[in-house]
């Protein structure tokens, strides 16, 4: 017979998917801790909450496999309760209830108060900015809005996250101040769409206003921009990036493709000419800016000719950072009515071709850095090296700076000047400048 309540159990939060999910899990953990609950992240626990991703096929498969893994542990008596939340649960809740009924309860992306109730906790509105960060102590994600109003035909995010809702500047400043007091030096601004920030509450694009407020916070030394939509990009942001040393010369702007016909089918609201004009503007205003983008190959109608256009554009633009994904045919998106007519093996081959081009570009750009000195922040020690990053690199997805650990000590989370002595495709090797 069970004699303990859920409130006395150790609650394990398991996070899958993107940085937005990481942030949501951290908020959940902060709420649980404020309620006196014992909470851990991806460790052994009596009660498990799985924060799922439902974006594309691979992510959905990982989420389902994780749910099945913990349900199996529950059936073995090793876990008492399994709860599921996040994007997959929001999008497929009826199907999940039918197919995996042993989960105790499913919740959507905006059901945090209800989930807390099931965990024996109350949602505390006064906890503005309070969360348990799961990233290294010196950097943290700052989610500035939720949801998305863009009509991209391939994307299911609005189905899972709802419409765009900006978080007021004053709340974000409070949250950032609390993070700074905990030792956070680098803020990574995230949203489904940074470009849209402020339109709903301030009736204007207010990303620039937010940046001006955040740079005033003592202790914050780097602010990085992730996931900006190209259409309607607020150009005042470029002036701030150029003049404010705290704003990293870096932007993550998913462009998806360059063929105008495919961009129209994707409902991206842009063209070949407009996209290139925007990139020219970035480089004109901030010549030192590192531009990261992501591309989709295999979208319905991507002929060999259109793919060759994409490849040549990648060669011409010479992006600093680039990721590439295969098109995923997602039900209830407007692209779902199109015939998914490109075989999976062709899609994968196209990814490999794009990434081979980018690998060479990355190698060439890294060779240009040899002999130069960069300010780096160090994230961890790994084997015989301290592993750091320049302002041109975001954690987990971009290049690293490796400094041999022999006879030196680098405090994790601190900055240091590093002279680059050699370079590989995605790594820079350097030595401390004393």
Image: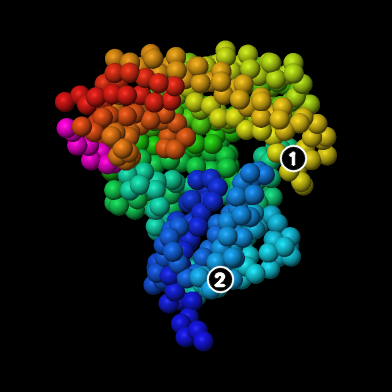
Q: Does 345 lie within the magenta span? A: no
The percent position of residue 331, horizontal first and vertical second, equals 76, 46
Whether 21 is drawn above or below 96: the answer is above
Residue matched to label 1: 329
Label 1 residue SS:
loop
Give the mark nearer the N terminus: 1 vs 2: 2
From mark 1 to mark 2, how far is it between C-alphas? 36 Å
Residue 167 visible in the displayed image: no
Seen at 50% across and 84% down, the residue is 2
- The quarter of the image holding the C terminus is top left
Q: Mark 2 highlights which residue?
A: 76
Label 2's element? Answer: loop
Whether 409 is among the magenta residues is yes
Residue 22, percent from left and from top: 48, 51
Which residues make up the magenta segment? Answer: 407-414
- Residue 308 visible here: yes
Q: Is residue 338 left or right of residue 321?
A: right
- Count of marks overlaid on the render: 2
Check residue 69 in the rendering and tell me which mark sits there, or answer none: none
**Is 364 placed above or below 132 here?**
above
The majority secondary structure of the magenta stretch comes to: loop
């Amino acid at each position: 017979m069970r004699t303990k309540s859920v409130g006395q159990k150790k609650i394990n939060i398991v996070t899958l998917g993107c940085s937005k999910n990481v942030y949501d899990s951290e908020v959940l953990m902060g709420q649980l801790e404020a309620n006196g609950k014992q909470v851990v992240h991806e460790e052994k626990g009596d009660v498990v909450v799985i924060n799922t991703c439902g974006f594309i096929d691979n992510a959905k498969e990982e989420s389902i496999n994780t749910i099945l893994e913990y349900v199996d542990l529950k059936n073995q008596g090793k876990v008492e309760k399994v709860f599921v939340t996040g994007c997959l649960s929001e999008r497929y809740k009826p199907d999940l209830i039918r197919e995996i009924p042993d989960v105790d309860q499913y919740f959507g992306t905006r059901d945090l108060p209800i989930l807390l109730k099931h965990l024996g906790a109350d949602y505390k509105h006064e906890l503005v900015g309070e969360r348990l960060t799961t990233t290294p102590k010196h950097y943290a994600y700052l989610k500035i809005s939720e949801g998305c109003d863009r009509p991209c035909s391939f994307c299911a995010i609005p189905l899972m996250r709802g419409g765009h809702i900006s978080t007021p500047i004053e709340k974000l400043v409070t949250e950032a101040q609390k993070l700074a007091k905990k030792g956070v030096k680098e803020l990574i601004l995230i949203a489904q769409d940074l470009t849209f920030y402020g339109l709903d509450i301030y009736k204007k694009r207010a990303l620039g206003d937010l940046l001006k407020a955040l740079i005033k916070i003592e202790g914050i030394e780097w602010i990085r921009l992730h996931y900006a939509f190209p259409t309607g990009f607020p150009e005042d942001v470029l002036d701030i990036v150029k003049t404010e040393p705290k704003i990293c010369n870096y932007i993550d702007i998913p462009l998806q493709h360059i063929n105008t016909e495919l961009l129209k089918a994707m409902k991206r609201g842009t063209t070949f000419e407009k996209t290139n004009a925007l990139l020219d503007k970035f480089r004109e205003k901030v010549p030192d800016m590192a531009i990261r983008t992501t591309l989709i190959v295999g979208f319905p109608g991507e002929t060999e000719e259109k793919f060759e256009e994409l490849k040549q554009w990648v060669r011409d633009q010479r992006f600093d950072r680039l990721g590439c994904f295969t098109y995923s045919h997602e039900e209830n998106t407007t692209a779902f009515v199109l015939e998914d007519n490109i075989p999976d093996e062709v899609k994968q081959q196209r990814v490999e071709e794009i990434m081979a081009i980018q690998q060479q570009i990355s190698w060439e750009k890294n060779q240009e850095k040899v002999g130069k000195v960069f300010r780096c922040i160090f994230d961890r020690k790994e084997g015989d090296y301290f592993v750091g990053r320049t302002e041109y690199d975001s954690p987990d997805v971009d290049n690293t700076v490796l400094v041999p650990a022999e006879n030196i000590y680098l405090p994790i989370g601190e900055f240091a000047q590093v002279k680059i002595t050699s370079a590989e495709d995605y790594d820079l090797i350097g030595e401390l400048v004393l």
